[in-house]
Image (cartoon, rainbow, N blue to C red):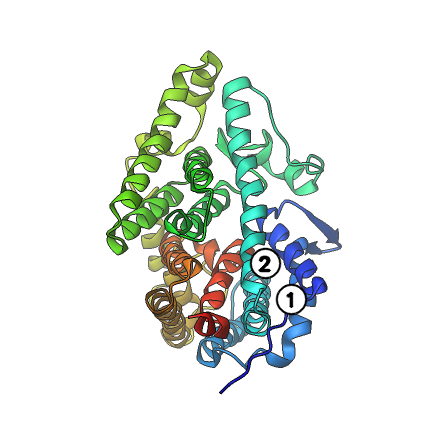
Amino acid sequence: MVIYQYKTTPKIILLFLVIAVIGAFFPIYGFSLGGFKLTLFRLGVFPLFLTQISTIFKYNKNLILLILLFLFLRCLTLLWTEDFQNGVSQVFWFFEGTCFLLSVNSLANKYYDFDSQFVKGIFIVGTISILFIFLQAILYFGFGYKLYVPFSQNIQEIAKNPFLWNYPLYGSGRIIGPFYEPNMAGSMCCYFFAMLIPFVNSKEVKFKNVLILGMVVVIIASIFTGSRQSLVSIVISIILCFTLFSNRKFNNILRVVFVIGILAFVVSANVSDNFVASLEESDNVFSRIEESSDVSGGRIAYIQHIWRDYGMNNFFLGVGEGTTHGGGHNVFLAVFLENGIFAFVVFLLMLISFLRRSYRSFRHYSKTINLSAFLIVISWIFLMLVNWAQLNQSLSFIYIGVVFLSLSKFTRIIH
């Protein structure tokens, strides 16, 4: 008989974890140290990683090795890249995200309450982050008032960015919340929705009406970011839940939530003359779809352009990390062209491992967070098809960390 010692997560670990989550969900904050920006995410991740470095290979070894091998192969291509500075930035962002995943993998198997503490942190900080997006949209388009994220007005990056001259709007009218770019704000919405939606059908949750309202708010916030990929990802999560569950009540709730979210956006246009005028000038999801003759938003043409420039120039080793500047907004193409076929195969194996493990955990162990993990992986893979930043941004790593909660030994013990 195996006897497990249940230890609670030390407060210092929780402090670093909260700092990392805040840093990912509010990347607008940070400290400039010469050419290096000390973000809150880094301020939380690296101390967290140092406390767990001795046990990073103890759990889920095969998946961890795939992640580290992929990181190594990307680093290797820096030796022949055409844009060394950009390549180093891309690799470093992935490196700090990897440090976070390794830390979560270790902590989830050491402390029985780590999963609940981590999920609580994501829900609390994530709710605040999305509420900023939602409130910025309602206050600006409804009343002409600009809501700033506290202590963010004088950040140099905002002042210098020509697309953020009208903060909190990006360009002509896309709400960005506490982010620098509206697609990242949209990513926040669709990842949060993927994590939230299983809890509406969970017996563990008492106040389900609050969660239903939360899903409506997330959909509206996503619309105002103008991120088409975000709204599509939310629809994918809803469709998957229809497919995975035969619960008629739950499916009816999903239908109602989606319809209310869309109707709330449409009906609000008749509430205020200022809203109507501002909305007509904004770049919300529907206006961007209506104005664009290309459903891909120019991405297909961009991909074709990148392929003509680089194509099969270096099939085995790639043209070097950072050379294509995002591979036409497609992570799969970027990895293949920049890092070569060997890294591309490792990348695919890594994704398959994430997908297979999260699905098996959801099917075998009846914890709500396991379904959240599976939906998050699906969202991540879809977003990487249309947005190259998804591979390296800290926001993605916070949510991918949820997968390691579903793979922890405590999930199996509880079952």
Image height check: is 155 above or below 357? above
Single out the residue that lies furthest toward the front.
Answer: 1
Residue at image coords 60%, 61%: 85
Mark 1 closeness class: few <14, some 14–19, many ≥20 residues within 10 Å: some
Q: Nearer the viewer, residue 103 or 42?
A: 103
Residue at the disc numbered 2 = 117
| Residue 354 picture quarter | bottom left
Instruction: Identify residue type, mark 1.
Output: Thr
* Residue identified by numbered label 1: 9
Residue at 32 percent across and 40 percent down: it is: 253
Q: Position of residue 237 (x, y in %)?
A: 34, 50
Name the residue: 40% across, 19% down.
Answer: 269
**Residue 273: image x %, image y %?**
45, 12
What's the residue type where badge 2 is placed? Gln
Q: Is residue 245 left or right of residue 105?
A: left
User: CA–CA distance between discs 1 and 2?
Assistant: 8 Å
- Percent of width and height locating residue 212: 41, 39
Left or right of 181 on screen, residue 30: right
User: Dots 1 and 2: beta carbons under 8 Å?
Assistant: yes
Task: Quadrant for residue 156, please give it.
Answer: top right
Residue at x 64% of width, y 63% of height: 45
Label tally: 2
Q: Give the structural element (helix, strand or loop) at label 2.
A: helix
